[in-house]
Amino acid sequence: MRRRLAALAALPLLLIASAANAADSAPSDPIGDLIMGVVTGTLPGSADFKMKASLYHAGARGVGVFDSLGCRVVAMRTAAVDVALIPKRTLLFIKETVGLQMPDGSVHDGYWYASDTGGAIKGPRIDLFTGKGARTMGAMKPLNLSQLTVVKAGEFKGCPQ
């Protein structure tokens, strides 16, 4: 009888130790990660970068109307990146651009398309296309030459819309 009572008394201690070990080696919680991704604006397991931003517009320094994929550049959506760091066709989320006014008057959701490259884009740098002419840079001027948080949010096919 005493052995049974001793075993029953030790049971809570064994359960606590077992729970502590399980917590240390617990697998990730994909649903929790997804919820946190929605809350923070990132995707689970996505890489984020601090990148120095610069702005560019059509007509500047020979910039044409097509990106390096052969698609038309899209104002406030096309981004030029270093493909050694971020592959072309990567959908990017830049939280600092959320809420900016778009050319059509709507509010920016923070998503950009890595569809362009540039000779000066090396390492953690990103060029954001603002539209046709220097006047299109107005809303984004505060972001020029600042550090932005850039998150790989997925991939896209075809041309940016």
Image: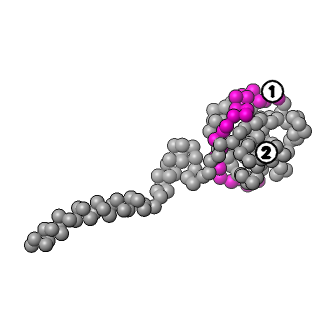
The residue segment tinted magenta is: 134-158
Residue at the (82%, 43%) spot, across then down? 120
- Mark nearer the viewer, 1 or 2: 2
Name the quarter where the N terminus is drawn. Answer: bottom left
Badge 2 is on which residue? 121
Residue 118 percent coordinates (x, y): 82, 45
Which of these two is toward me, 49 or 101?
49
Circle 2 residues within 10 Å: few <14, some 14–19, many ≥20: some
Amino acid carrying label 1: it is: Arg
Residue 106, placed above or below residue 40 = above
Residue at the (26%, 65%) spot, across then down? 14
Which of these two is toward me, 75 or 50?
50
Residue at the (22%, 65%) spot, across then down? 11
Badge 1 is on which residue? 135
The answer to whether residue 91 shows anywhere in this view is yes
Q: Secondary structure at mark 1?
A: helix
Which of these two is toward me, 27 or 35?
27
Q: Is residue 136 magenta?
A: yes
